[in-house]
Image (cartoon, helix red, strand yellow):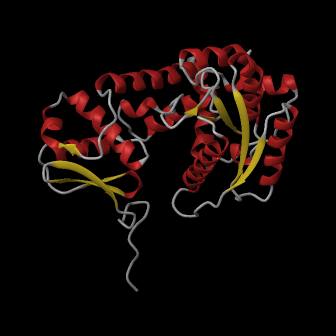
Amino acid sequence: MILARVRRTFDERELAPRGARVLVGCSGGPDSAALLHALARIAPERELSLFAASVNHGLRPDADRDVEAARALASSLDVPFTALRVEVKREGSLQAAAREARYAALHAEAARVGASHVAVGHTQDDQAETVLSRLLRGVGVIGLASIDPAREDGVIRPLIDCRREDVRAHVARHGLPHVEDPSNADPRFERVRLRALLPTLREEDPRVVEHLARLADEARGLAALVSDEEPEARLPVAPLAAAAPLGRRARLSRWVEARSGRPAKRAHLDALERLVGGGPGDVLLPGGTVARIEDGVLVAAPEPDRPTRSRPAESSP
C-alpha cells in the first residue's frame, strides 16, 4: 500500500530527480525499515542509486543492536551500508543536540558517497504531531509549516504522506528486521504525550491526522506566497516596517527560523514587530540568539550565555 503513496509523493513533491544518488538514514526502527525497503523497490524504475547509514548516538547501551538491525536489512536488499557514530553534547535539549549531530553525520556521509539527497523516515503522523506541538507552543501561522518534505539541503521525506499504521503494516507484511526505540513509550518526551492525544482527537474527526498534515502544507504554501525568497541575514527595517502585516510577519518568521534554527513563536513575532516599529531594546529568540536593530538594519547574533527562563543566570557564591 505504501509503495503507491511513495511513488506519488516523489512525483507530486518533486523529492529527487531520476537517477539521483540517495543516502537513506536508518535508525533501525520500523519507519526507517519501511523507508529503505520501499525505496529499494522503486529504485530501479527511477534509476536511483541507494546507500544506507545508521547513526549511533552513544546515548543507550543497546544502541548497537539498532545499527545491526539496519545493517541486516540493508544487506538483504543489497544496499551499501555504513555505521556512523557521533558524540552528542549533553547540554540544553538532548534530543535537539542528538538531531543536530545525526544530520551533520548523515550529510557528511552523503558527501562521501556522492549522494545529493538524504532520505529520512518521517510519516504523516509525525507531521501531525509536529503541527500540534507548534500550536501548543504558540507559533504563528507560518510556523505551522512544520516538517518540510523536501528541504533545500537535500533532506527528503518519502513517507510524509503515509500513515504510521500503514507503514507498520508494511513492515509486518514483509517481515522486515527492526527494533523498537524505548523512548517512543516514554511520557517524558513531548512527542509521546502528543501521540497519546491523537486517538481521542480521531474520535472527533477520523481524518484529523490528514487535516493537520494538510495544514502544514498550506502554511508552507502561504510562506512561499508572501515571502518567496530566502531572508537575508540583515534585514533593512524601513521596507520591513512598510510591508503589509501578513507579509512582514511571514518574512520575520522565516528570518527567525533561518537565524536560530527553530520556529518563531507568536511572542517572538510580536516582540520583533514592536522592535521594527521603533520600540527599544532587543529580542531574545530561540536557541539563545538575540535580535536587535543596528544602523536601521535588523540583525541577529548568538548569545549562548544570555539567561533565559529555562537557563537562569548562575547565582553568585
67 or 143: which is nearer to us? 67
Q: Residue placed farthest to the bottom in the image?
A: 317
Residue at image position (40%, 34%) is 143
Question: Considering only vertical position in the picture, is 203 above or below 137?
Answer: above
In this view of the protein, can residue 206 be seen by the observer?
Answer: no
**Quadrant housing residue 35:** top right
108 or 68: which is nearer to us? 108
Q: Is residue 95 left or right of residue 170?
A: left
- Percent position of residue 256, x then y: 34, 44
95 or 235: which is nearer to us? 235
128 or 57: which is nearer to us? 57
Residue at image position (49%, 20%) is 214
Question: In which quadrant will I find the N terminus?
Answer: top right
- Percent position of residue 98, x then y: 60, 53
In this view of the protein, can residue 59 be seen by the observer?
Answer: yes
- Percent position of residue 121, x then y: 66, 33
Question: In which quadrant will I find the C terminus?
Answer: bottom left
